[in-house]
Amino acid sequence: MKYLSYILLTLLGCIFYSCHDEERDFVNTPTQRKRQAIEALNTELVNNKAGWLVMYFPKTDSLLFSNISDKIKAEYQYGTDRYGYGGVCFTMRFLQHGKVEMRADFDPKSVATSIMSEYKIGANSCTQLTFLTTNYLHKLVNDSYGGACDWLYQGRDEDGLLVFKTASYLKPACEYILMKPLHDVHEFADAVKQAYDNRRVFEQMKNPQLYIHRGGRVYFQSDYYLGRNGGRVATTEKQRYYLFMEVTKPNPIPDYPPKEFSVLGSGYCGTPKGITFRAGLRLNNKQVFADFQRVGNHFEAELVEVYHPEWRSIRLVSKHLHPEGKITGLKAVIQDVPTNE
Amino acid sequence: MNIQKYFLAYIGLWALLATSCQHDTLSDDSVVDSNAPQTQTAQWIEQHFTKVYGPEVVYQWQKNNSQKGVYVYPPDTTNIKQVLNAISSLCFDTFRDIQIEGKGNLLNYCLPVRITLYGGGNPDENGVERMYNIASQPVEMSIYHVNDFDANDKQKVHRLVRSVYHQMMKRVLEQMPYDRAKFAAISEGKYITDTQLLSEINGANNDIGLVGYANKRGFYTYLSMLNPEDDMAEMLSVTLTSTPAKLKQAEDEAHTPDEDSDPEVNKRYEQEAERAYHDFMAKKMFVEQYAWNNWHVKLLTLQLKSVRTLNKYLNTK
C-alpha cells in the first residue's frame, strides 16, 4: 500500500509538472518560417524587373588538370575523353503567376529568342526553385552535362550574388549556380548576347595560350599548339572545356610530340564582360583565375585582394570585379598566338 | 485497507481526467501547400481529359516521379493538348465502347491512375530508349517526347501510340492476369533481361517496330526480348498498331533461316528458324486466346479498329 502511494504520488507529480509552456527558440512555427523563406525568395526574384544574369556550371571538377606540378607524359592523359564540362550563361526574368522568361547563350537563336516557362518556389531540404516546364535550362539535363532543374537556395556569396546548388552532388565545388541581378531592362537581351560574343571570340582563337606572371616572374606559360583539326575543337566547344599546355620536356626527335607537359584546364563560359572559368585556372589553392575581362581580342585577369568585413576573410578576385581591391600584381592573359600553320 | 486503495485509485483517475481534456487551439497554418492558382493548361487538362477519362495528368516537373540516373525533363506546354488529344482519340476511345459481360467497360481496366508527361526521351543507362518508366508500376503511365510530337508526322504518332498501348496493356494484364509461367515457357532461355545487348546492335537503341533480328528469335520487337512481361505487352501493343499483313511479314521473317556457305551452319540456322517460328506462333495464339477469354472480344476485331482509327487520324491531319 505504501509503495502504491509513492508510485501514485510520483505519477501525479509527473502529470502536473509535465505540461508547461515551453520556451520557443523561434517566434514562428517551422511551417511559417518555411513559407516566409519561400515568399522572400520569390519576392526577390520577381521584384527585380530587369531580370537576372545566371551562370550555371552543372558539372565541374576542381581536381581535374589543376596541378601544374603534375607532369603529363602520354598522349592519352590529355585526350579529349578526359575533358570536363563548362557552363552556360542565361538571363532570366521572373514574372507573376509562376512564369519565367529566359534566354541562353547556346547559339544565335537562343540569344535572340525568349522562351516562357513555368517555375515554382517550394521547400525541400532548403528553399527550392524548380523549373516546371521546358526551357533552355533543360538542354543541360542529359548524360554529359548532368544538369538538374531543381535548385536549392544556399544564400548569398561575398558579392551578394544568390547561390544555388542541386541535389546531384554532396561534395562542394562540383557545380556552380550564381544569380546576379541585372540593373537595366535592356540588359536582359544585351548581357546574354555579349556573353555569347565573348565566348565565341575565345573559341575562334586559333591558338589561345595562357600566360600567368607577376611582373617579370612567369608562373605558367602555355606554348603547345593543340591544333584545329580532328575532334579536339568540336569537343572543346561542345563541352566548353579548354586545356592550356606548357611543354616542359621537348622531344629531341623533330615533329614528335613533346615528352612532358605541365597543364592547366577548366570549364568556361562567356560573361557580359569577358569569360569565366569554373572551377578556375588554378595556380594553387588560393591563386585561382576565374573571371577574365575581354580587352580587345584577348582576355585578362589580374588578381586583387579583397577583405570581407562580415566574414573576416581575405580572398583573391579579378580586378575588374573589384577595382578597389589591393593590387597583388598577379596577372593572367589569354591571347591568340600566331602559329606557322 | 481496501477502502484506502480504492480512494487512492479514485484520486488518480480524477487527476488523469482533469489534466487530459484540455482544449488545444489548432494552428491556422497548415503544413499543406496553400492553393496555388491553376494554370490555363491545368484547367484545360482537368476539363477535357481528367473529367472525361479519369487519369490525373502531371505535366509540371516533379522530381520524385523520375527514375534515378535517367535524365528526363518536363514538357513544353505548347504540345500538351495535341498529345493528350491523340492519346484519347487513338487509344482510349478504341477501348471505350467495349463492354465485358459482367465486368463493365474494358477501358476501365486499361487506364492508369496518373499520366506523367516528359519533354524528351527516356534512354536508360545503356542508352536504349524505353517506352515507359522502368522504376514505376503500370498504374502510372509516362509519356515521352512530348516536345517534338507532331500530329502530322506518322513516325511520331506511331511512337506515341505504341508507348501508350504498351503501358495500357501492362495495366490490363495486371488487373486481368494471364498465365505468366505458361507464356514465359514458350521463349524460355531466350530473354536477355538487360539492354546491354541492344545497345551494341546498330539502331536497336531507338527501334520500336517489328524487326527481323527479333522475329528470327521468336519475338516481335527488340524490347520484347527483355522479359516475359515486356514481351506480352509488346505482343498486344504491336498487334494493335500493325496491320495483319505486317504481322504476316514478321511471321515469314521468323520462319526464314539465315544463309551460310557452310552446310553445318545452315542446318543450325534452319533449326533456329523452326524454333523461332514455333515460339512466334505459340505466343500469337496465346495472346489471342487471352483476349478472347478475358475481354470476350477477338483480338483481330480490336486490331482492325485500332489500325483504322490510326490511319483515319493520320489521313485527316
Image: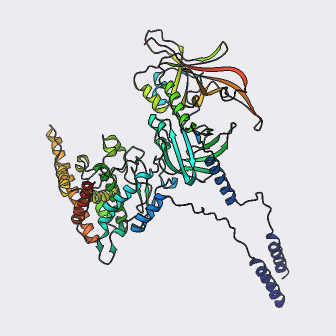
Display coloring: rainbow
Left or right of B97 in this view: A270: right
Q: Residue at x 54, y 34 (%)?
A: A190
In front here: B315 or A11?
B315
Left or right of B186 in this view: A124: right
At which x and y percent is residue A285? 66, 28
Q: Residue at x 30, y 67 (%)?
A: B95
Task: Establish if A40 lies above or below A303.
Answer: below
At which x and y percent is residue A77? 49, 25
Res A57 visible: no
Left or right of B149 in this view: A284: right
Image quarter of residue A158:
top right
Image quarter of residue A263:
top right
Task: Establish if A192 lies above or below B50.
Answer: above
Left or right of A36 in this view: B4: right
Q: Quadrant of the C terminus of chain B?
A: bottom left
